[in-house]
Image (cartoon, rainbow, N blue to C red):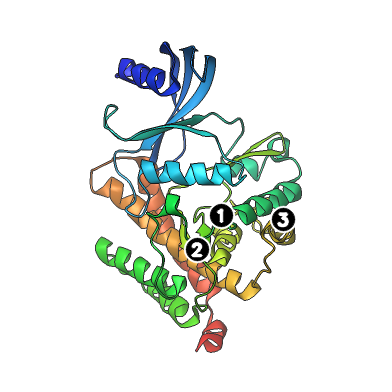
Amino acid sequence: MNDRGTLEAFLAEAAGAAAARVVSDVQLTGGAIQDNRLLLVEFAGGVLAGRQELVLRRDAPSGVAVSHGKAEEFALLKTAFEAGVTVPEPLFLCLDKRLGRPFYIMRKVEGEARGHRLVREPAILGDGAAVAERLGEELGRIHGITPPRPDLDFLPLPEGSPALAAVAAYRAHLDALEWWDPALEWGLRWCELSAPPAGELVLVHQDFRTGNYMVDAGRLTAVLDWEFCAWGDPMSDLGWFCAKCWRFGRDELEAGGIGPREAFYRGYRRTSGREIDGEAVAYWEVMAHLRWAVIALQQGQRHASGVEESLDLALTGRRAETLAWDVLRLTPPARWSAAS
């Protein structure tokens, strides 16, 4: 990082230290819409006296329109931390542009997050059913956060059905991309006809899936990536986690590619005290494939526009074709009959 001195001055001031020295600064992989850096910092006094491993998190040069800014993400992480959710401890927020873009600092957490490794390497994941159950517990704690919350007043309350609002939003995103795909339009219409009624509102993570949590030797160490949170239907998070598109090829393990669905559900029931609506979860699994298809197209557009040239973003854009096929598979004519 070219502006290391500026960062050191901020860290010293935020931690109440006489000085802070960045011993090392390493770019972390992963996070298509985030710039994450691992910092080894030596503090002279203050609340973090000594050597600390920290993570600096800021937006990538281009992003997805629906993701929160760093101030909002920091507030969400703080709320989750205080609610007992297993997350990295949020430490300091910087909203000015001394490093080019707003950023925040959190503690480093040990573990592996890459989905393709978690579902294929038992030495990392350990007992997949136990991890799935623990993740259900964590999601139940997240869903214990409900409106109104003055600290989360930047989250708008949905008007009417969250499902119908999602359909309208995805249509708008496709229109903005000037992209028309008959399979995606088919799925959107099915979701419009099949939408569950508006009900209880809770804080939904909206990206709670394999790839966004960390496991270290079979132990869950952190739930990550809070930039998409909203007030919504609790079943939507369960559908996102269990959707085929987030099983990383382990389709027989319906809970995120790591364990049986019932283990995940069991943990969720334990901490949420909420019964699970299987039909609603199945609905949100269809919606998950539509949403991921829209995001994939948006990521591809970031590359195609020239704003952020990236082979990874370009390849992500190609995933929309497979996701469209999954939408068709999940909405056969028999399901249309039930919806109409």
Decide which of 58, 187 is in the foreground and name it: 58
Decide which of 308, 36 is in the foreground and name it: 36
Q: Position of residue 261 (x, y in %)?
A: 70, 60
Q: Are marks 3 and 2 in contact (CB under 8 Å)?
A: no
Mark 3 surroundings: few (<14), some (14-19) or many (≥20) residues within 10 A: many
Q: Position of residue 272 (x, y in %)?
A: 66, 60
Q: Are marks 2 and 1 in contact (CB under 8 Å)?
A: yes
Classify mark 3: helix, strand or loop: helix
Q: CA distance from mark 2 to mark 1?
A: 9 Å
Task: Using the image, tell me which numbered label, if any, was put on residue 288.
Answer: 2
Which is nearer the N-term, disc 3 or disc 1? 1
Q: Which residue is mark 1?
A: 246
Residue 324, quarter of picture: bottom left
Mark 2 surroundings: few (<14), some (14-19) or many (≥20) residues within 10 A: many
Q: Position of residue 56 (x, y in %)?
A: 43, 29
Q: Which residue is mark 3?
A: 267
